[in-house]
């Protein structure tokens, strides 16, 4: 993305080291401008350019719902993380319902869904999805988001 979450992390934890990537070069450029202490590059979540266990924590906020192959991305994140993976996705059906209630995206299926979203998880379904690769430590959220922390196995 454009580095918004990185900016929050770096403000709260100035010693934190962040390495990030996005498939869109323009997003990478914006993230680097916003967070000059971090390191960003263009890359694919399906083939992360890092060795196994390269990072203590791997995170993907508002990413998994957009992917054609979320299982492949989850496995790749589990590969590069040595401790934890933290993910957030829209909490369904509440995300779509909230949009529909304000008349947004009524031409989409399901009604109210973002046109770029391919995956729709409730909290239990997302826990099950994440547990295919990680030991789920916590599933929580802040409406309309689900946040999951998974511990790397092994």
Image (cartoon, rainbow, N blue to C red):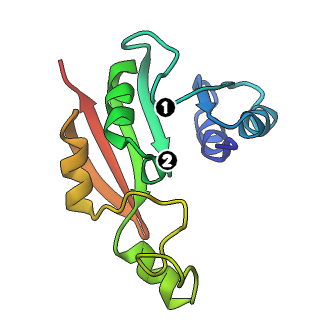
Residue 43, image x and y in percent? Answer: 60, 26
User: In the figure, residue 123 lies in which quadrant?
Assistant: bottom left
The quadrant in which the N terminus is found is: top right
Residue 124, image x and y in percent? Answer: 20, 60
Residue neighbourhood size for the residue with mark 1, other residues' Cα within 10 Å, grouped as few (<14), some (14–19), many (≥20):
many
Identify which residue is drawn at 62% across, 45% down: 8
Residue 23, image x and y in percent? Answer: 62, 35
Judging by the rendered image, the residue that carries numbered circle 1 is 45
Relative to 56, say whether 65 is above or below: below
Identify which residue is drawn at 42% across, 46% down: 68
Residue neighbourhood size for the residue with mark 2, other residues' Cα within 10 Å, grouped as few (<14), some (14–19), many (≥20):
some
The quadrant in which the C terminus is found is: top left
Residue 142 placement, left or right of 79: right
Relative to 106, say whether 114 is above or below: above
Q: Looking at this view, name the residue that lies furthest to the right.
A: 33
Residue 90, image x and y in percent? Answer: 42, 62
Q: Looking at this view, name the residue that lies furthest to the top.
A: 51
Judging by the rendered image, the residue that carries numbered circle 2 is 63
Residue 17 placement, left or right of 151: right
Mark 2 and mark 1 residues within 8 Å of each other at the beta carbon: yes
* In-front residue for pair 84/14: 84
Secondary element under disc 1, as helix, strand or loop, is loop
Secondary element under disc 2, as helix, strand or loop, is loop
Identify which residue is drawn at 33% across, 30% down: 84
* In-front residue for pair 32/48: 48
Relative to 27, say whether 103 is above or below: below
User: In the figure, residue 87 lies in which quadrant?
Assistant: top left
Identify which residue is drawn at 42% across, 82% down: 97
């Amino acid at each position: 993305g454009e580095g918004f979450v990185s900016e929050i992390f770096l403000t709260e934890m100035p010693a934190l080291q962040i390495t990030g990537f996005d498939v869109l070069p323009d997003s990478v450029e914006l993230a680097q401008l916003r967070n000059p202490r971090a390191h960003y590059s263009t890359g694919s979540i399906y083939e992360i350019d890092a060795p196994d266990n390269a990072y203590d924590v791997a995170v993907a906020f508002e990413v998994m719902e957009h992917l054609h192959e979320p299982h492949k991305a989850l496995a790749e994140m589990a590969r590069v993380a040595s401790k934890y993976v933290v993910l957030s996705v829209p909490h369904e059906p509440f995300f779509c319902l909230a949009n529909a209630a304000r008349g947004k995206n009524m031409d989409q299926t399901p009604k109210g869904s973002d046109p770029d979203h391919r995956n729709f998880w409730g909290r239990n379904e997302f826990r099950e999805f994440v547990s295919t690769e990680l030991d789920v430590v916590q599933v929580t959220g802040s409406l309309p988001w689900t946040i999951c922390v998974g511990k790397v196995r092994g």
